[in-house]
Amino acid sequence: LSSEQTLEENITFVRPAYFIITGFIGIPNVNFYFVFLLFVYVLSVVGNGTVLTLIIVDHTLKGPKYVAVFSLALTDILSSTAFLPKIIDIFLFNHRYISYNECLTFMFFGFTLPAMQSFNLVALSYDRLMAIMYPLHYQVKVTQRSMINLIAFLWIFTITLILIVVGFITRLSFCKSVVINSYFCDHGPVYRLGCNDVSPSRVIGVLCPVIMLWLPLAFILATYCCIVYALSKISTAQERRKALKTCTGHLSLVAIYFIPILITFTIGAEIHPNARIINLSLTSVFPPMLNPIVYVLHTQEIRLSIKRILKFTQRDKVMAK
């Protein structure tokens, strides 16, 4: 036993100086796509930055719901910033060599932030469930403190999970290829390059989509089954429509996030690798851009907040003159 322990302690993991990211090869006029991504990035930062600013400065946007909205907008900004500038730098400026440590960092943020987008939608669905099923006791059952605790737990859980994922990658030796066939340091293409036992990475690679995507989606669907059941007990159709209208923004966010992923995973094996890479990259960048637009359109409190701020701004300009 002691000799086995000594052998394990003396194992040297072969870690390359760099990886080569090879996505988007052979696509005509692909540079236009990266310019489009830059445009998407600007819209994402401006839109989500506006939502964050409104929640910070407007005292009327302080309920538990807006704790989850703040976390979602923050996640969207971080996700866009982690992905888009790096993708543009890699492919538009042909910096396809990425160091080992930088690749693992890219992988960590590349999975942590999309997972938190999913979990933020879970928190918002819980908020809608409590608001509709217990309208008279909602402010007691869902407080700002309880929502902050829930969001903090989801962040800690997600970071811990992805640290385990990346930690397993550090236990791999790379003595063959260093070419990653993806648009970022994707977990699957990276661990498959390992030339020692990749079983832990393979197992967690199967578990992570279940934990980060399918369980949240199942929870959201279950909450809306409960919401529909609760609405069926409301006597008038007008009250049912009014209650359901409060869910339209959240349902739009769920559709924007999950439908492209479901389509990509459903037909992924049947489409060209480049088409799959483009589909996956779009599913990463579109939700952060569209989420603030959806919330501005569907949330009356945010629309009123924007109108108040614009009114104050115009009044200050008039007074300055």
Image (tube, rainbow, N blue to C red):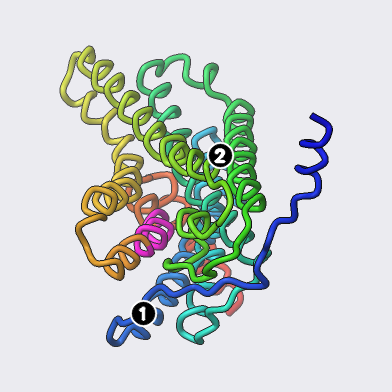
Q: State the SS at label 1.
A: loop
State the residue in front, 9 or 168: 9
Q: Position of residue 318 (x, y in %)?
A: 53, 73
Q: Which residue is mark 1?
A: 25
Task: Give the residue displayed 54% in from the left and 34% down from the top.
Answer: 63
Q: Is residue 145 left or right of residue 8?
A: left
Q: State the SS at label 2.
A: helix
Q: Is residue 321 left or right of residue 27?
A: right
Task: Give the residue displayed 56% in from the left and 39% down from the top.
Answer: 67
Please tell me whether residue 66 is drawn above or below residue 320 in the rendered image: above
Q: Mark 1 belongs to which amino acid?
A: Ile
Q: CA distance from mark 2 to mark 1?
A: 41 Å
Q: Which residue is mark 2?
A: 67
In this picture, which residue range is highlighted in magenta? 281-292
| Magenta-span inclusion, residue 288 | yes
Please tell me whether residue 100 is drawn above or below residue 295 in the rendered image: below
Q: Position of residue 25 (x, y in %)?
A: 36, 79
Q: Position of residue 184 (x, y in %)?
A: 49, 66
Q: Main secondary structure of the magenta part?
A: helix
State the residue in front, 263 or 57: 263
